[in-house]
Image: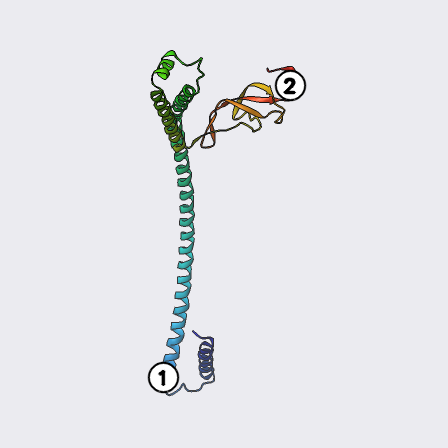
Amino acid sequence: MDDSIKQALIDRFRGYLEMVEDGEEPPDDPGETADLFSVLVEMAALRSEVRTESRLVKEALEQFRGVFGSLQASQATLQRELDRARTETRDQAQSVLRPLLLDVIDLRDRLGAALTLSPAARPRWRDRLWRRDRSGVAAWQEGLRMTLRRLDQVLLDRRVVATQLAGLPFDPRLARALGTAADSSVAEGTVIKEVRAGFLWDDQVLRTAEVIVSKGDAGKGDR
């Protein structure tokens, strides 16, 4: 209700009370007095209702805050459980897949070694095949290369990549030094040769590389 209307009603009621105290007769129209009284009664009832509604709203807000807090706590707990379940699932999958990936890498090493055998190390059947049918040997070698490419793609699809450490500073987390060699063209402690390639799986070491590292003093000979 507007403040001016409220003040007008209060002034009229105050005037009525003053007339009664002075012994004056009430207005001829009793309806006007009844209407003023009814308005005041309604105002009092409205004020009480507003207070009641305010209290109910306040209680509802308090309950909502409690429910909202419980929902937030439940969501945080659920998120932690989901994260833990994802981590456990990933760890279990990796523990199962890791030996298989290492077997694929070992097979890849063997196929690569077969392509790079020196003539002295080649088996006699391969030399006989070479002399008898050069085209057959070429096809055999191309078949090995295709298999190697396929194995590399299988590893790449599973986020397994070779470390490629040659020319980089030696990192014991990624490689194991098999020996040292003098090389004045690079800084001391640089990987100058990968004897066996290392591999990373999701940025974690799957297989440690085996390398030769440069040394500073060439006069001491290889270790």
- Which amino acid, mark 1? Pro
- Which amino acid, mark 2? Ala
On screen, residue 14 above or below 146: below
The total of numbered circles placed on residues is 2
Which image quadrant is residue 29 in? bottom left
User: Which image quarter is the N terminus in?
Assistant: bottom left
Q: Position of residue 213 (x, y in %)?
A: 57, 22
> What residue is at 58 percent from the left and 19 percent from the top?
180
Q: Position of residue 93 (x, y in %)?
A: 37, 29
Q: Nearer the viewer, mark 2 or mark 1?
A: 2
Give the mark nearer the N terminus: 2 vs 1. Answer: 1
Residue, disc 2: 218
On screen, residue 117 above or below 86: above
Near mark 2 (Cα within 10 A), the count class, few <14, some 14-19 or many ≥20, is few
Residue, disc 1: 30
Q: Position of residue 207 (x, y in %)?
A: 46, 24
Distance from the alpha carbon under mark 2 to that under mark 1: 125 Å
Q: Position of residue 151 (x, y in %)?
A: 38, 27
Foreground residue among 35 and 198: 198
Which image quadrant is residue 178 in? top right
Please, which residue is most extreme toward the top here? Answer: 124
